[in-house]
Amino acid sequence: MISWMQKHRKYLVVTIWISTIAFVGAGFVGWGTYQYGNKSNSVAKVGDIPITVKEFQIAYNNTYQQYNQALGGKLDEATAKKLGLQKQVLQSLIYQALLKNFANEYGIVVSDEEVQNTILSIPAFQKDGKFDKATYTAVLQSMRIKPKAFEENIKNDILIKKTISLLTPGVGELELEAFGAAVFMADKLKYKVFTAKDVKVNVNEEELKKYWEENKNRYMTPKRYKLALTWVKASNKLPDENSIENYYKEHRTDFTDKDGKIIPLEKARSSIIKKLQLKVSKKSAQLTYIDMKKGKKSPEEERIVDSGDPVFSVEIWESIEGATPGTVLKPKVSDDKYIVIKVVEVILPQPKTFKEAYNEVKEDYISKKRLELLQKKAEEAVKNLKNAQVSDFVTRDSVDKLPPLTKDEASQFLQKLFLTNLSKGTILLDNKAVSYEVVEQKLLNLDKLNEQKSLIEDNIKKVKLSQIESNLITKLQQKYAIEIYLKETE
C-alpha cells in the first residue's frame, strides 16, 4: 500500500481536494516541526490568499487520517514523513488557494446560508437525525478547531466545489461508447479462492524480533510531555442568591439544552455555583502561577502524558503544545478546579522496545506471512485449474457473481482483473488469494451500456474534469505568485 501511494501521490494531490468535513470526529495528530520564516501565522501565500497555520493543521490531520485508514490504522509520523505527506498537503492547499484566487477574480461567492445548510447536514453533528449544537461544539473541541475557523474552512470547501462545478464538461457519443467498451468488457473465468484456513503460519520469537528490527520505525511511541502540575481547588463557600441571579442574567445564553434553548435558572443553578466558586479561587490560582514561575513554589506532582490525552481539555493541550520546555502556563480550569502547568520536557516519538511493540509486531508479521503463503499457494494452483469454479460472464460491477468472495472482495478482485493484460494469474486481496484463468471474453454490451448510461457519463466527466483541473492549475500557477514560508526542520 505504501509503495502504491508513493507511486500515485502526484495524482492524489491534483485530483483529491482536502475536505474539512471528510474526517469530522477523527482524532487529531501532530504534524512535525517547522520554521515559518517571517510569516509566523501563515505557511504560504498564493496571489492574495494566505494559507494559515491552522488551515495546514486541519488539512494535514484529514489527509493523515485518510492514509491511516488505507494502511489499517498503522500509519505513524516516520512513515508519513517518508511519504512526503506534509508536502502533499501544502501542495493541495496551494492548488485550492489558486482556485480561490480564480473564484474571487470572477465573482464566485458563497453565502452564509450555504455554509449553515452544509453544517446542518453533516451526520457527525446530528443527534436523532437532527443538528445538535452541543454535539457540534463537542466534536469541534475534540478536533481542536474553533467554530469560526471550521465555518471558514467549510466556506472554502464550498467555494472550491462550486468553482470546479462550473468546469464540468459534457460527454460525446463516441466517448460514451469507447468508455463503455472498456468498462463493460466481460470475462468468463475459472477461479479458485484461498483463505487463511488454507495456510498455516508458524511464528517464533527469533523471526518476530528480526521483523521488528527491520521495521522499528513503524512502531513509534506517541509524542509525550513531562509536566509539573499544581492544582488550586475551587472555593467551597456558597455564593449568595443575588450573585447567582446576576450571573445568570449576564451569561444566560451560555446555559442551553440539546435544542439550543436557554434553560431556566433553577436548572442552571448548580453550574452557576461552580463557576462562581471558581471565580473566587482565581486570584489564588494566579498567585500560585506567579510563585511557580519565580521558582518559589514547588509543583505538587510530575506526570508524563501522551499528547492529546483526554485528561486535559483541548484548550489546555493547545497551550501545552504551543509552549517551550521550562514555560509555566497561566492557570486553566480543569475538572472544576484550576491547574497550573509547567512544561518540563517534550519527549518526541521514538521506536518502541520489542516488548512494547510485541502484540502489534506479531499481528503484522502473521498477516504478512499469511499473504506470502496464500500467494505461493495460489501461484501453484494456477498451473492446473481443472477443478476450479467457473463463473458467468462478469464485468467490473459483477460483485455478487463470484462466490465465496464477499461483494467488497469481489469488487477488489474485478478492479485488479480488468487492469491486467494477463489471461491467467493470481490476485492478492486483503486476506485472500485468487487463482484465475480467462476462458472466454465478450466486448461492449450495448444493453448494459444503456442500462448504466448515467453512471458511465459521470465517470467520463470525472476523467475529463481531472484533466481540465490539471490544465487550469498549470495556467493559474503562471498567473498568481506563490510564496512558501514553511520549512521543515531536521
Image (cartoon, helix red, strand yellow):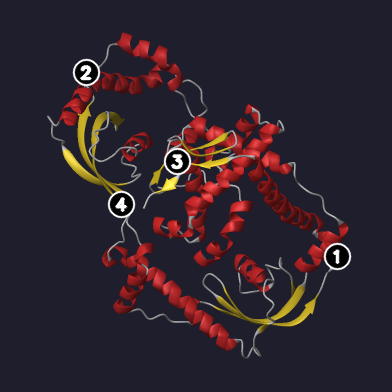
Residue type of the residue flagged with mark 3: Met
Distance of mark 4 from mark 3, alpha carbons?
21 Å
Nearer to the camera, 48 or 188: 48
Which residue is depicted at the point 86% across and 61% down? 174
- Tell me which numbered mark, 4 or 2, is placed earlier along the sequence: 2
Residue type of the residue flagged with mark 1: Asp
Assess disc 1: are there few (<14), some (14-19) or many (≥20) residues with their C-alpha within 10 Å of its C-alpha: few
- Local secondary structure at mark 4: loop
Distance of mark 2 from mark 1, alpha carbons?
81 Å
Assess disc 4: are there few (<14), some (14-19) or many (≥20) residues with their C-alpha within 10 Å of its C-alpha: few
Q: Where is residue 185 in the image (x, y as percent from the top left)?
A: 77, 71
What number is the disc on residue 248? none
Q: Nearer the viewer, mark 1 or mark 4?
A: 4
Distance of mark 2 from mark 3, alpha carbons?
36 Å
- Local secondary structure at mark 1: helix
- Tell me which numbered mark, 4 or 3, is placed earlier along the sequence: 3
Q: Which of marks 1 and 3 is in front?
A: 3
Q: Name the residue under label 4.
A: 348
Q: How many labels does the image show?
A: 4
